[in-house]
Amino acid sequence: MWLVSELVELWRRLTSRRLVLFGPSLALSELIPHEGFGPDSLPYPLKRPETLPTFSGTAALARAIEALRLAAGERILCPAYNCGHELEPFLRADLELVFYRVDEHLCVDLGDLRTRLDGGVRAVLVTHYFGFAQPIEEIRELCDQYGVLLIEDCAHAFLSDRGGRPLGSLGDVAVFSVRKSLPLPDGGLLRRAAPEVATRDDAAGSVGAVASQKQGAESLTAPPLAATLGKTLDLWQKHMMLPGSRWRLVWTRAALGLALPLLLLRRLLSRFRVPSAVAWYDPDDEDYAFDVRILSWGMSAVSSRLLERMDYAEVRRRRRANYMRLAEQLRVLPDALIFEQLPPGTCPLVLPLRLARRDAVALRLYERGVTVGVWWDEFHHAVPWRVHPEAVALKASMLALPVHQDLEAADIDRMAREVLAACAAESGDVSLSGGASETRGAVQGCATASLPAVCE
Ligand SMILES: Cc1ncc(COP(=O)(O)O)c(C=O)c1O
């Protein structure tokens, strides 16, 4: 029965013309070397000698712990609003975690952070949620004042800067999860060592630079081929679903013959948690009990190669344009937008919305072929949730809408209409689905209580 429903789901995905997908896809032709390809420069922190390519952001955090020589029993301050995955490397290194407050606008509460910075703290982890900058200069100052190390979590913030300075360049170390913003089978980065002043796009980067970042990479093992292949196929499968895909029919048939058995096997292995499933490990697996071996995996050759070929200016431009277009149409939802403005240097990962009836809205959107993210709805056991009500409220209400580089204006407009219609249906206010601004205030049942605009 399960197999049948999986087959039906895959068939639906492969044949539907109206899907808005959550992440960007990969054309396999990108993997074939050709002349004149590759950006003239690679963005921060790629190509820098102090940058270590890893399998994932989580693996980069494990290497950060090593690079900073954090020892068992030492205390680390972490944001109460977290996905939980970023906590695991610290917990597995037997560090003591203490949580500081993040407010409902996703801003670090500097007052609360200061009260927790006493002599026992060794490092502070700061997350730039969705690519939007935290007040990182103030946090750096605080850390310097107390002699504490700063770890910047830029898992969502690759290609983002603040005032021309890239996010991830002020911490003692910074971690990135490039696989989240780009169509890569895997990929994290650890930026180690004291940074000099950096610019967002490093001048004169060169093809071959990513793969040659070997400093420290010797201690990492290559991820299993099956994991790389499985995820590359997933990304390719997504590409076949793009409405404009010229080869759609050909690919669909080829996929049924070739990719389907592999995809099914992969789902089967992870479903039944077969011990060898680590060979097929999917970095999007949200289970906190992941195999410790993934923490010492490096970046696959496929991801290293692809990183040298991306049009980063276009990725940034598209994500920003999509965000602004979507935000403009969703302003009619009172207080649902967390970041109403898009600061000049921000490269958004998604557009986060706060909705009281988040889960019901998400279900309606899935049914309409709009893939959204019910964001971080899992509660990691290490966090004392009852003393962090803001974090709990964020976990209960956050919906992430895609704004990635594959989406075009027509996709954004359709998504906006579908979101408004879903909110209207949930709040009982049918006029909202027409997007009329006079309905503002009439959908309080769907949007949340008042939220000011931005963090920056
Ligand atoms: C804020 C944050 N940091 C770190 C990570 C870990 O990155 P990865 O999924 O690449 O291991 C995640 C992943 O969800 C995250 O959201």
Image (spheres, rainbow, N blue to C red):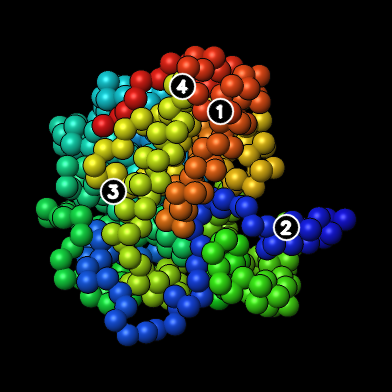
Q: Earlier in the sequence, mark 1 or mark 2?
A: 2
Q: Amino acid at mark 3?
A: Ser
Marker disc for residue 160: 3
**Separation of disc 2 and disc 3 at Cα?**
35 Å
Mark 1 or mark 2, which is nearer to you? Answer: 1
Q: Amino acid at mark 4?
A: Ser
Relative image position of residue 419 (x, y in whole percent): 56, 34
As displayed, is residue 60 above or below residue 350? below
Q: Amino acid at mark 1?
A: Gly
Marker disc for residue 12: 2
On screen, residue 149 versus residue 339, left or right, reads left
**Separation of disc 3 and disc 1 at Cα?**
34 Å
Q: Quadrant of the N terminus?
A: bottom right
- Callout 3 secondary element: loop
Relative image position of residue 437 (x, y in whole percent): 46, 21
**Neighbourhood count class around disc 3 (C-alpha, 10 Å): few under 14, some 14–19, many 20 upward:** many
Q: Quadrant of residue 76?
A: top left
Relative image position of residue 208 (x, y in whole percent): 29, 78
User: Is residue 234 or residue 283 the one in the foreground?
Assistant: 234
| Label 1 residue near ligand 1, CB within 8 Å | no
- Callout 2 secondary element: helix
Residue at the disc numbered 4: 437
